[in-house]
Image (cartoon, grey):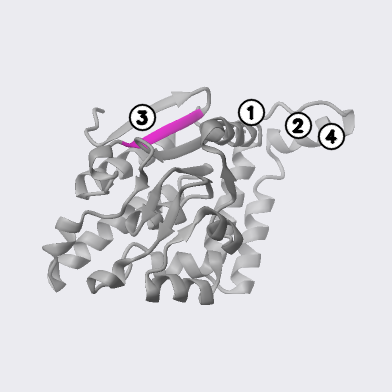
Amino acid sequence: MAFKNILFEIDDSTAIVTINRPKFLNVINSKTATELTLIFEEIKESKTIKSIIIKGAGKKAFSAGADINEIKRLTKKTARSFLSHGHKMLKCIEFCGKPVIAAISGYVLGGGLELALACHFRIATKKSKFGLPELKIGVIPGWGGNVRLPRIVGRAKALEMILTGKILNSDEALEAGLINEVVAENEFMVKVRERASRLNEMPPLAIKKAIDTIMKATEISFQEAIKLEMKNMSSLCETYDKKEGIAAFLEKRETNFKGR
């Protein structure tokens, strides 16, 4: 499938998805959201892709947010469709069953940060800037920022960022737990690819079940989460990868997981 606003490539077992609108700071309009949804639906079904890197084209922005011109035209009636479209995109990323790394360089604001929050890892360059400044245009984050951000950085920091529109630098974001790592720009993508390569060595079925358990656990009660954990762990106990993992451990050798 040909895409207009994103680029897609596969390097070994890692898919690299690039939001390709550098002239517009990689703003996510409706067409871009559709394309991201479609590519992550494809990635979910792939038997060869084990990890995903998502990044913005150029060095100025991962993504500066949703399209302000589309937001300007929203009414109470049309807003729900616009927001649902964004939530579908982020759900496809969050629950694709494979680890997604947000490779953040430059500005990651508004809907761009909400996209990064749906990823499982966030690695940033030293000069990156993070924020949810929607209140400054009279609205609130609408693609899950009010929900995911406090779960990641805590309620106090989320309230500070959202209610004041405060922009964090990379060191502040790392201290808040918003990102996993800050990397020098000259070795940025090397480090991101190294992280993806390490993830590719892990057992795919266990990765999928771990993501499913962790992401759903915050949406259900503690006891329901424990039941889900037991169900997902039990489902792995007769797999080839479990037998291989234990055999490799006992034999003191490298593992060779097959994803079955």
- Residue 252 vs residue 174, the one in the foreground: 174
Given contact means CB atoms under 8 Å apart, are the residues at marks 1 and 2 in contact?
yes
Q: Earlier in the sequence, mark 3 or mark 2?
A: 3
Q: Amino acid at mark 3?
A: Phe
In magenta segment, residue 30 = no
Which secondary structure type mostly characterizes the magenta part of the structure? strand
Query: Is residue 89 in view from this perspective?
Result: yes
Count of residue discs: 4
Q: Earlier in the sequence, mark 1 or mark 2?
A: 2
Q: Secondary structure at mark 3?
A: strand
Question: In 3D space, how far apart are the residues under numbered discs 1 and 2 (Cα atoms)?
Answer: 9 Å
Give the CA distance from mark 3 to mark 2. Answer: 32 Å
Residue 6 percent location from the top left of the image = 29, 35
Work out whether mark 4 precedes mark 1 in sequence or the reverse, and give the earlier one: 4
Q: Nearer the viewer, mark 4 or mark 1?
A: 4
* Residue that badge 4 annotates: 249
Magenta region: which residues? Answer: 14-19
Q: Which residue matches tag 2?
A: 244
